[in-house]
Amino acid sequence: REIFKIANEQRGKRIIITAHAAVIRAFWGKITNTSADALAYTYDYPDNASVSVVYYDGEKLVPGEYSHSKHLADLQ
């Protein structure tokens, strides 16, 4: 519910919410309606320092890109 509160208060703006990998993966499972059992083999843990993008259409959270890490390529 807090995510919706933030999204509504910041409508039209980009916001950043940071979290650890397990929280991001669980959140991604929630917005994609992936069961906890299926989550383990559907989504890997996101890469460290990756970016996952979620859109808010005014009613629901819409998954964008999960665990985007191309910006880290030059660091490897």
Image (spheres, helix red, strand yellow):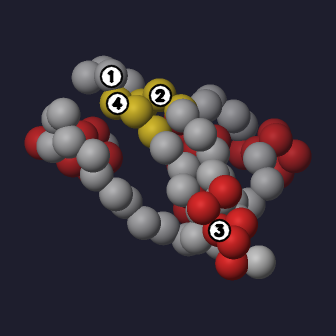
Whole-number angstrom distance, CA of label 1 to CA of label 2: 7 Å
Quadrant in the picture for the C terminus: bottom right
In terms of sequence position, does the residue under pointer 3 or pointer 2 come before the other?
A: 2
Residue 55 vs 40, above or below: the answer is above
Tell whether label 2 touches label 1 (CB within 8 Å): yes
Element under disc 4: strand
Query: Is 19 displayed left or right of 33 in the figure?
Result: left
Q: Are marks 2 and 4 in contact (CB under 8 Å)?
A: yes
Please name the residue that numbered disc 2 is placed on: 62
Picture layout, residue 70 above or below residue 76: above
Mark number, residue 72: 3
Mark 3 vs mark 1: in front: 3
Quadrant, the N terminus: top left
SS at circle 1 = loop
Q: How far apart are marks 3 and 2 (CA)?
A: 25 Å
Of residue 35 and residue 44, the one placed in the foreground of this image is: 44
Q: What residue type is labelled 2?
A: Val
CB-based contact (under 8 Å), mark 4 and mark 1: yes
Q: Distance between the residues labelled 4 and 3?
A: 26 Å
Amino acid on which disc 3 is placed: Leu
Which amino acid lies under the numbered mark 1 shown in the image of this protein?
Asp
Neighbourhood count class around disc 3 (C-alpha, 10 Å): few under 14, some 14–19, many 20 upward = few
Q: Which of marks 2 and 4 is nearer the N terminus?
A: 4
35 vs 6, left or right, is right
Disc number at residue 57?
1
Determine which of the numbered discs, if any, sits on residue 56 in the image.
4
Q: Residue at x 37, y 60 (%)?
A: 17
